């Protein structure tokens, strides 16, 4: 990984060692002991498959920002999707009125030093914390879905935000890694939840029944969970969550209960989305569709190109099989992928959008 100068290298090493020493949840292999008796760990060589990124500029967009007005954003962190995460973070900071007020809370399932170094070197001024999500917590609860990527334990981490995030985080915006934000994220942060546990764009024109199997709908008891509700599809890649209310309402347990039913009966085909729908569809605060222009990755099997939906856009979401960085690298991008490319910090950037 190419770094600017010696001081930058030393700064990164100091930050990383501090991260290791203060985060007791990660195993550090003892290698040496300082004069103060502090055990230092072995920092392995950078993984060759982790991409290298350009340093992002420091954004200071607003003149009247109060640093106490913190905005909390949570995303998962994985080397396979790191390029998407970097683009998402850049887009959020670039369009925020007060980027210095944003604090990121990253969830990862395994210790990846090079991923940490990549974030620190790409966004030197970023306020962020990293938390360990124990994959074993869901391994016995996951049922095979129609696409392998949906079966990864980290895909289920969003269910456990109230258990993982520190107590001072009362509200959080959860975002997938395949998004870019083209509006001030503060507008989404300020949505009035109206005593609801969760806010997200709803899509009531979608055929809600297709998210569950015939076995579910023909069961004499299971469909009754929607009685008294007007259930609509919503995408869990963009959510505003009242963390305290989620915890108080034991929503993690409620989602897990439906995952247990899925293990016994095949009641849905997708990954972590259907149990969210079973618990919260028709019970959330609806947000304008501009905050999740989803489906840009195509369907979950073939990932064919899709066009933008009509109307204003604040957030673009490449949900589905096709990811913009992969299609750009293959020189077979969809027309919507050029909207993602300006936020790509991958180095060297050799995309050709004319082909």
Image (spheres, rainbow, N blue to C red):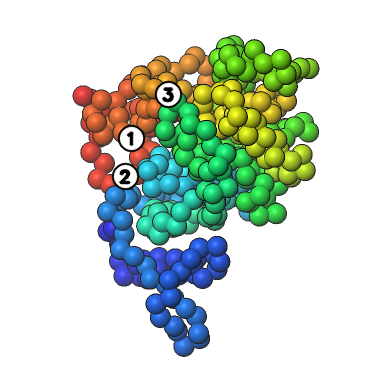
Marks 1 and 2, the one that precedes in the sequence: 1
Q: Position of residue 143 (x, y in %)?
A: 52, 33
Q: Secondary structure at mark 3?
A: loop
Depth check, front residue: 267 or 81: 267
- Give the residue displayed 40% in from the left and 68% down from the top: 13
Residue 215 image-quadrant placement? top right
- In the figure, 226 relative to 164: above or below? above
Q: Secondary structure at mark 2?
A: loop
Of badges 3 and 2, nearer the viewer stands 3
Q: Secondary structure at mark 1?
A: helix
Depth check, front residue: 179 or 207: 207
Q: Which residue is mark 2?
A: 346
Q: Residue furthest left?
A: 355
Please give the label number shown on residue 300: 3
Residue 194 image-quadrant placement? top right
Cβ–Cβ under 8 Å for marks 1 and 2 = yes
Give the CA separation, mark 1 to mark 2: 9 Å
Quarter of the image containing the C terminus?
top left
Instruction: Report the side of 249 relative to 353 (left or right).
Output: right
Cβ–Cβ under 8 Å for marks 3 and 2 = no
Q: Which residue is mark 1?
A: 325
Question: How many residues crowd around disc 1 within 10 Å: few (fewer than 14), some, or many (20 or more)?
Answer: many
- Give the residue displayed 48% in from the left and 31% down from the top: 144
Q: Position of residue 353 (x, y in %)?
A: 26, 28
- Give the residue displayed 67% in from the left and 46% down from the top: 162
Depth check, front residue: 125 or 297: 297
Q: Position of residue 257 (x, y in %)?
A: 67, 35
Instruction: Report the side of 157 relative to 354 (left or right).
Output: right
Visible residue check, residue 237: no
- In the figure, 213 relative to 339: above or below? above
């Amino acid at each position: 990984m190419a770094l600017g100068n010696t001081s930058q290298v030393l700064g990164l090493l100091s930050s990383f060692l501090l991260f290791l020493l203060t985060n007791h949840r990660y195993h550090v292999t003892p290698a040496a002991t300082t004069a103060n008796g502090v055990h230092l760990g072995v920092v392995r060589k950078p993984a060759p498959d982790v991409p290298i990124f350009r340093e992002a500029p420091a954004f200071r967009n607003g003149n009247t920002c109060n640093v106490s007005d913190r905005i909390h954003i949570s995303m998962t962190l994985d080397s396979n999707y790191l390029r998407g995460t970097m683009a998402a973070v850049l887009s959020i900071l670039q369009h925020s009125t007060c980027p210095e007020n944003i604090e990121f809370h990253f969830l990862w399932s395994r210790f990846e030093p090079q991923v940490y170094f990549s974030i620190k070197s790409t966004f030197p001024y970023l306020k962020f914390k990293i938390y360990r999500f124990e994959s074993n917590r869901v391994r016995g609860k996951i049922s095979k879905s129609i696409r392998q990527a949906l079966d990864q334990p980290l895909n289920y981490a969003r269910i456990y935000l109230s258990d993982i995030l520190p107590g001072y985080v009362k509200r959080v915006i959860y975002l997938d890694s395949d998004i870019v934000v083209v509006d001030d994220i503060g507008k989404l942060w300020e949505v009035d939840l109206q005593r609801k546990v969760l806010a997200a764009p709803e899509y009531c024109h979608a055929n809600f029944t297709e998210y569950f199997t015939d076995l579910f709908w023909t069961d004499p008891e299971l469909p009754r969970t929607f009685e008294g509700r007007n259930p609509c599809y919503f995408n869990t890649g963009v959510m505003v969550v009242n963390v305290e209310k989620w915890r108080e309402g034991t929503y993690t347990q409620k989602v897990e209960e439906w995952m247990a039913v899925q293990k016994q009966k095949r009641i849905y085909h997708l990954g972590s989305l259907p149990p969210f729908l079973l618990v919260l569809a028709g019970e959330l605060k609806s947000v304008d569709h501009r905050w999740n222009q989803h489906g840009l990755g195509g369907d979950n099997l073939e990932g064919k190109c899709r066009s933008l939906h009509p109307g204003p856009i604040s957030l673009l979401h490449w949900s589905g099989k096709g990811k913009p960085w992969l299609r750009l690298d293959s020189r077979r991008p969809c027309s919507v992928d050029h909207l993602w490319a300006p936020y790509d910090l991958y180095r060297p950037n050799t995309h050709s959008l004319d082909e």
